[in-house]
Image (tube, helix red, strand yellow):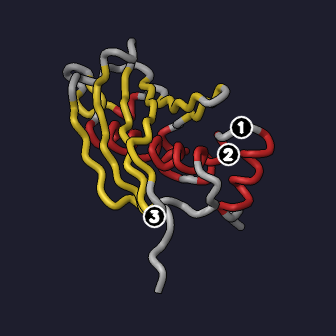
């Protein structure tokens, strides 16, 4: 039996360990994603594994893995940042690939651009060796609450 999201969020908020959310999302669990929270700083980490390689000649991370990592980071940020126990829905998400993702751990930070009653606009930045040299930036719009009937 799968635990419901409100229960997982309540446990994460009570313990301060947000990695139980990763276990709740099968794809995030498959990728081995980690959530790190220190005070009001939120960061996700994607540890390197060979299954993330898209171009073995370089080797370079697969663009789909990077995109999924950015999307998951945005959703986890909203669950951490908001009081809601509802899973945000992706309205749209675009990714700008800036550098080759090398065969090493990748980190992501999230900035809330604007939060409305129903929609949040986020910028998610992925980097590896240095935060000032991003490998990709995601821009996403997320539905926070379902529309009223």
Residue position marked by numbered label 1 in the rendering: 17
Q: At which x and y percent is residue 94?
A: 25, 47
* CB atoms of marks 3 and 1 within 8 Å: no
Which residue is rendered at x = 42% and y = 53% of the image?
A: 120
- 1 and 2 marks in contact (CB < 8 Å): yes
**Circle on res. 20:** 2
Horizontal and vertical percent position of residue 125: 36, 31
The residue carrying mark 3 is 118
Q: Quadrant of residue 64?
A: top left
Question: Is residue 79 toward the left or the right of residue 148 in the image?
Answer: right
Hey, which quadrant is residue 15 in on the image? top right
Q: Nearer the viewer, mark 3 or mark 1?
A: 3
**Outermost residue toward the right in this view:** 14
Of 82 and 136, the residue lying toward us? 82
**Horizontal and vertical percent position of residue 148:** 48, 81
Kindly report the distance in space between the C-alpha atoms of the residues bearing marks 1 and 2. 7 Å
Name above or below for residue 82 compared with residue 84: above
Rounded to the nearest angstrom, the CA distance separating label 3 from label 1 is: 27 Å
Q: Please tell me how crowded label 2 is: few (under 14), some (14-19), or many (20+) other residues with Cα within 10 Å.
A: some
Vertical placement of residue 40 versus 82, above or below: above
| 111 shown above or below 4 | above
């Amino acid at each position: 039996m799968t635990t419901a999201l409100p229960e997982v969020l309540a446990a994460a908020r009570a313990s301060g360990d947000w990695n139980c959310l990763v276990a709740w999302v099968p794809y995030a669990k498959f990728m081995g994603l980690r959530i790190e929270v220190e005070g009001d700083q939120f960061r996700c980490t994607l540890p390197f594994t060979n299954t993330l390689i898209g171009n073995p000649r370089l080797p370079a991370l697969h663009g789909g893995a990077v995109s999924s990592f950015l999307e998951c980071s945005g959703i986890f940020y909203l669950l951490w940042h908001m009081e809601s126990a509802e899973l945000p829905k992706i309205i749209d998400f675009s990714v700008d690939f800036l550098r080759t993702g090398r065969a090493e751990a990748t980190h992501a930070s999230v900035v809330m651009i604007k939060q409305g009653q129903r929609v949040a606009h986020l910028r998610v930045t992925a980097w590896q060796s240095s935060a000032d040299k991003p490998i990709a930036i995601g821009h996403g719009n997320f539905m926070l609450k379902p529309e009223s009937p």
